[in-house]
Amino acid sequence: MNKLTKQITALAAVLFGFAAFDTAIYQLCTKPCLPDQSSGMQAKSIELDRYLPFDEASEIVDVKSEFQLTDELPVIDGAAALYPICSAFVNAVYPEDAVSFDDDDFTAESKLQMRNTRAAYKAVVDGDSDIIICAKPSEEQLQYAADNGVELELVPIGCEAFVFLVNGENPVDDLSVEQIKGIYSGEYNNWSELGGENLFINPLTRNTGSGSQTAMLSFMKDTEIKKNPFGFIGSPIGFSFRYYVEDVVEHGNVKMLSLNGVYPDKDNIADGSYPIVSNFYAVYDKSNENPNIQPLIDWMLSDEGQRIIEETGYIPMPAEKE
Amino acid sequence: MSDKIFKRLLLICTAAGCIATVVLIMITTILYKDCSIISYIANGR
């Protein structure tokens, strides 16, 4: 091999080496982070203006109640996934001028806000919101309330399944509750240990203080969550609430796992056979003197309020047994 | 090709490769911070 050939080979080897390395990084790390453009994912992006109250084009459940509030309107706020319910409640019982929206977000005067779980818990403690519709608070959120001398009242108004998600091509369809705990505690690190392919398990978690992360910590109880250091080159598992992922599961490359052989559909959640069902709550500051808080929550628990929850896609509270 | 030109080309190729890798890692980090867990699962394996 002459000198020129050796030099060209060396240059080509350097370029090929970088190209192969960068391709591997792209496939393993960059590609999974790209926004999912599937129709299900697009449909589930909670855009405020798609679920506005008093808007003919809105996608909320449009019910007009005989129960109407006219003054001292509680400010309603909550989790993004529960925003369609908040908006439908406001649409049903508030006057139209109670809500103002400036193309991007609700104005400060609006009686409907959407700050998401973490900010909503802060807002109800700080007195910026009167009722928030959220999952159970985290330890930090309870501590923040206690530090500010606020006692929170949590009234369950509906329930939803806590679901685990994997890629649609993952051959695993069902896991036991103990296996899920084993994945998140580091006992299982490879899908082949659970009947899947020989790939590392990448157990994903959410931001601290988000409703689903709080639910996950509650599910794991005292067991510490551990990350798999090689998980990023493997196949992920994550968690969420069923409603939030329903459309994505239907149209995207994601599937919900059965737990203990029970799939998280509406019937299995309602009859209690699906093992992890969480309530969501109307939360308020016990010392809040707004006289309409209790009547409004009573209405949320009425047949009409519960019908809005059900038609939005969530599970209403089970009827009390006589 | 003289040794001097070869070394210069080798240096340019290496530098370009390093820059491309660093840019890719930066883009990946930014995307990872913003990406939803569901997108991540859908795009994964």
Image: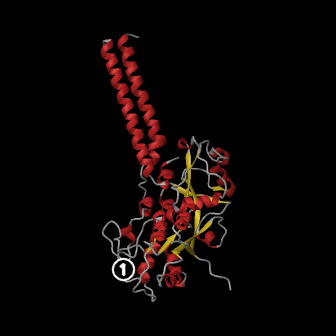
**Neighbour class for label 1 at 10 Å: few (<14), some, many (≥20)?**
some
Q: Quadrant of the N terminus of chain A?
A: top left
Q: In this picture, is A244 found above or below B35?
A: below
Residue A157 visible? The answer is no
A217 horizontally vs A103: left or right: right
Image coordinates of residue A40 in percent, x first then y, are: 45, 60
- The colour scheme of the drawn protein is secondary structure
Secondary structure type for disc 1: helix
- Determine which residue is flagged by label 1: A98
| Residue pictured at 66% horizontal, 65% vertical | A275
Q: In this picture, is A68 found above or below A176?
A: below
Q: Name the outermost residue toward the top.
A: A2
Image coordinates of residue A13 in percent, x first then y, are: 42, 23
Q: Quadrant of the C terminus of chain A?
A: bottom right
Image coordinates of residue A58 in percent, x first then y, are: 38, 74
| Residue pictured at 38% horizontal, 10% vertical | A2
- Chain holding disc 1: A
Amino acid type, mark 1: Ala
Q: In this picture, is B14 found above or below A32?
A: above
Quarter of the figure with residue A101: bottom left
A28 horizontally vs A111: left or right: right
Q: Name the outermost residue toward the bottom.
A: A66
Quarter of the figure with residue A62: bottom left
Image coordinates of residue A187 in percent, x first then y, are: 67, 47
